Amino acid sequence: MKVLKYILLVIAFVFIQQETQAQCVPTESVKVCIPKLAGGFHFLKSYEINGRGGRLEKVEYSYPFAKGTMYMVNLCSADGGNQGLVVTLYDAARKQLATSVVNGQQLQAIVFNCQRTGIYYLTYTFDNSTSYCGGSALGFKR
Amino acid sequence: MKNYLPFLLITAMLTVSSCGSDKKDDADAFLSELDEGIDAPAISEETINDILMQIPAPIEISMLMKESGSAYDRTILSNPADVSKYNTTFKRAINLGIYGTDLIYTNIFNKNQEGLAYMKSVKELADDLNIGQFFNIRLIGRLATNNDNLDSIMLITTQNFNAINRYLQENKRANLSILFLVGGWMEAVHINCKMAIDNPEVTSLAERIGEQKIILENIMLLMSFYAETDPNIKELYEDMLQLKEAYGNIEITYTYAEPTTEIVDGVLMIKDNSSSTVHITLDNVKEIDRVIETIRTKLTS
């Protein structure tokens, strides 16, 4: 009977863990983020950020940025506002260009005035996050 | 036995929750039928999705055309009435992308009524591909009656196309997603070429065509994976080798300099001090246009 009890406890644990993960609904954060793109920026892409309860250190996306175009990337955390979410921009050679944490301050968005066409990487990480969950929108203007 | 009741209930709940995926299984089964017996390529789904993300949204190229002062030209677009001709999964997926770009082009130039004709064709193809649920044609039709709603139409259209891509990739039908994106990309380059030829003084149009060399390299890489298993993609890939050849004459040079940053109202403003230069001539544009025209005629016939 002890074995049966153990098996059932494991099943219960797995179930609870699944439920905890299911609480991350990045689509909701994305919905919040899109209208928050600053005036003049046209919506391009939305990105879901699910750190799976802290098991993923980073979530990465890439996009081709074009010379002469400004790109805005904003952050919406399930923690509220942009708390706990960080975006770091890398160029095609994986050289870090900027990050949304400056002197310990977590910023709500970055705007990149691109002068060199190429593939860029947007890496989302977590800093003191409780939800490890959020969304982000990418917009552009010329 | 009484002591185990909570655990049995949990087990039952788990069983019930897994039953919730039946609907998705049905969709998967249906999409499998569309698969037409094509084997998945020997490459990770993650790599495919990474490359798919690097194909630009047509809205960016289309916006440049309007800002350059180019005039709207409906004759260069695909005919929305041809939708009934597309009766294979391959033709439907690629022409969905083509019509999608044409729709965005009409939107950007405030040609809402013409846009509605494209919207109907897009919806029809999407329905045929079992992805019609992403289009609320009534809502878009209502918004299209007023030019002030342009931003809303653009937003909804872009969101719909993003949702389609996500759905196809999540349902392991990235081959359709590739066709959809390649069709859309090629149509954007096609329109851009026509505009650049008509407006040679607007150098930004030709430059944008030249910049697509970076994207084409990724597209060719992606298609090469599927060309091994999908005869339709193989044929398209072989046709696009000519496009790659046409792009062979274009050179892009780069210089790197550290960016500078400042914070303005809680937003980090990044000034890019690097630069890129596209070396492209009008003859290069005409050659790219000629090759695309040939491929496009085949795809829309």
Image (cartoon, rainbow, N blue to C red):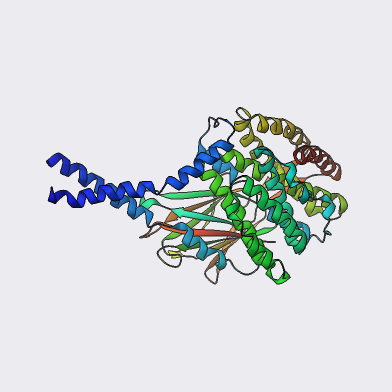
Hey, which quadrant is residue A7 in on the image?
top left
Vertical placement of residue B37 versus A107, above or below: above
Of residues A128 and B272, which is closer to you in this image?
A: A128
Vertical placement of residue A83 versus B87, above or below: below
Hey, which quadrant is residue B107 in on the image?
bottom right
Hey, which quadrant is residue A138 in on the image?
bottom right
Vertical placement of residue B117 versus B83, above or below: below
Which residue shows up at 40% across the image and 58% down it? A127
Residue B260 as seen in the image, left or right of residue A16: right
Q: Quadrant of the C terminus of chain A?
A: bottom right
Of residues B287 and A9, which is closer to you in this image?
A: A9
Which residue shows up at 62% across the image and 30% down it? B230
Q: Quadrant of the N terminus of chain A?
A: top left
Residue B255 seen in this snapshot? yes
Q: Position of residue B41 (x, y in %)?
A: 55, 31
Q: Position of residue B261 (x, y in %)?
A: 57, 62
Which residue shows up at 71% across the image and 66% down it? B144
Q: Position of residue B264 (x, y in %)?
A: 56, 70
Of residues B243 and B294, which is closer to you in this image?
A: B294
Residue A137 as seen in the image, left or right of residue B56: left
Q: Position of residue B38 (x, y in %)?
A: 58, 31
Residue B189 as seen in the image, left or right of residue B31: right
Residue A13 seen in this snapshot? no
All told, the count of numbered labels is 0
Of residues A46 and B21, which is closer to you in this image?
A: B21
